[in-house]
Image: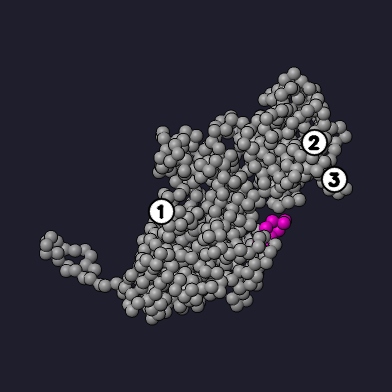
Amino acid sequence: MSKVMNWQINREMDYPYEGARPDKQIAYIFDTNKCIDCQTCTVACKTTWTSGKGQEQVFYNNVETKPYGFYPHEWDPKLMEILGPQEWKGKTFAGKTIFEATQDGLPVKGFLPDEDSYASPNLGEDVVAGMMEQGAFFQGIHKVWMFYLARICNHCTYPGCLAACPRQAIYKRPEDGIVLVDESRCRGYRECVKACPYKKVFFNTVTRVSEKCIGCFPLIEQGEQPRCVQTCIGKIRLQGFLSKPGEEKADNPIDYLVRIKKVALPLYPQAGTEPNVYYIPPVHVPRDFTGQMFGPGVEEAVATYRSAPKDPQLLAALLMFGNTSRIIERFKAEGELAVGWDRDGKEAVRVPFTEPFFAREFFDKKHETYRHNIT
Amino acid sequence: MLSLLFFSAAFAEPLTAKAVANVPAHELYASDWGSAGEVEISVLPQQVASPRNMAPTITKLKARALADKNWVSIRLQWDDKAKNDSVQVDEFTDAVAIEFPLGDPAMANPMMGGANNPVYIAHWKAIWQRDVEDGHTDVQDYHPNFWSDGYPFVKGGWPYPVETAFSGSDSMRYLPGTNAGNPISQLDRYRPVEELTAVGYGTLATQQYQDADAWGEWKNGVWTVIISVPRVVVDAGNPTFETGNQNIAFAVWDGGAENVGGRKHWFPFTPMVVQ
């Protein structure tokens, strides 16, 4: 095992390979507060990449309802169970990562879901955390909660799947950090399926080898955001590139939101893989739950998120979400406008902080009919 | 001394490939097999390299060998209470393999060979046997009541058998492993055995030319598998079997115990005599 620096757990940790960060790291930010579980991302991904036979249960992208939705079934309670009780001391993880809690000489601690775990992609969908008292819904704010968690491969800096593959059939691209399975080299051992803490490597029963999200790399190579990001009607997603620790750029929206404002947090950082899909945590969910899921920065992230209306730069960064298909490499606030530029320096986004409000007459004189929607 | 013990072992009587006019390569219980001397091999759980087999389930392989002018055939039998010939995410196939050194027999490492001493492996898989006998196992074989709205660019009708419906290049793109030419993902299989070469851990590679043959059957809790290797082929990746001594190693996988890859039972190189 080598010692590598994992900034998300604020310490060095064991990893089977030498640390080698890519030139730039593909990264995503998902705003859980905006997701409406429409599954457009899931369908966009499915129709693009996994419509073949043997891929019926392969979802590179899925959206699950927390706390009772999972795909595969109970993937994260099982992860918590195999790792056991763990502790954060402040911002530093004092427990054991999946690379440090290993047994039997394996490089990664994991588990293999059974076939039935993949049978119900939307089991638990829209199920809330507890029973609501009668009439509570009509009495204003209530304490019963749920939220939607959109999930893809995290294109981890220290991928568990890559560490576990005895054939080195999984690799991380040095140019953008995308993690890929070499489909010609995999022999279907499923060590990667076992090892991925997020269960985002899938086994195809027809081709008998593993598959995973490819980060829509043909789009990325053209400066375009992935399909799941482009098609998100809730505009909850932003894809870009995260700089190496210590090389953050304040005008890079991903660097700004993840490392400078710390408003977007990694999913289960305690697993130790340094995942690169970052979540703006739900503001209404008990901190015990979100703290376990997103680490010790939740309170601070929620407070920062709530301050966005009074913070033009933060607001501008958040307005990069869903307003262009291009990957935004640079942004800034210009007065009451948010402006973003792509890798070619071309302006790709220019949106107002506040959208203009139009109200139409209730009665449409031209068509002599009443409108149902006047705003 | 320790390394020699690790690399090789010997039985009281070496496995002898008895000369016959024609080896019964697909006749698992032919009388010729009874006339060949049986060697009992006490296999070991592979616990040298990760991933290891920490829960061994197979203890013995029984081997007999026959040879004619074209083939050397090894018949292997072992107890396995369950027939595992399918793969799903949590299902693994039974399998057995024989291995021969391609370089210096004295230096060949049975653990996947080495850079200067490659090894030849003939690997029979129960799921490939099923493929050959019944066609490529498909989604409807695992899930008879499954439904899918459709598949892009396929031919024919429901349930769109993968061997025929996905024959076009457009539809093949949705079978990533197959489209990439992965031998594991091959849809039209004629032999249940794969010929491979290895030069160390993680280097296992399917040979370009597949010359070996095999046949197997599970009956009453026992697998019986014959693996036949041509005595002489042009293929440089194959061993050549002159009359005389040869080294052979073995490996066996219990799919029901999640054996796959390095999670196996094995036995190091041991002498074999080819008549």
Q: Nearer the viewer, residue A127 or A238?
A: A238
Viewport quadrant of the N terminus of chain A: bottom right
**What residue did someone put label 2 on?**
B247
Rendered residue at 61%/65% (across/down)? A272
Tell me the amino acid under the disc marked 2.
Asn
- As drawn, the residue found furthest toward the top would be B21
Mark in the foreground, 3 or 1: 3
Query: Could you tell which of marks 3 and 2 lies nearer the N-terminus?
Result: 3
Q: Is residue A303 magenta?
A: no
Q: Tell me the magenta residue range.
A: A99-107
Q: Residues within 10 Å of mark 2 (few under 14, many from 20)?
A: many
**Disc 3 target residue:** B4
Marked residue chain, label 2? B
Vertical comparison of A288 with B73: above or below? below
Q: Is residue A70 visible?
A: no
Residue B8, image x and y in percent? 82, 42
Closest to the observer: B102 or B49?
B102
Helix, strand or loop for disc 1: helix
Q: Main secondary structure of the magenta part?
A: loop
Q: Residue at x 53, y 73 (%)?
A: A247
Q: Amino acid at mark 1?
A: Ala
Marks 3/2: CA–CA distance: 13 Å
Where residue A34 sits, quadrant-wise, is bottom left
How many numbered circles does the render carry?
Answer: 3
**In contact (CB < 8 Å): disc 3 and disc 2:** no
Secondary structure found at label 2: strand
Q: Which residue is disc 1 drawn over?
A: A44
Residue A275 x, y percent position in the rendering: 55, 64
Q: Residues within 10 Å of mark 1 (few under 14, many from 20)?
A: some
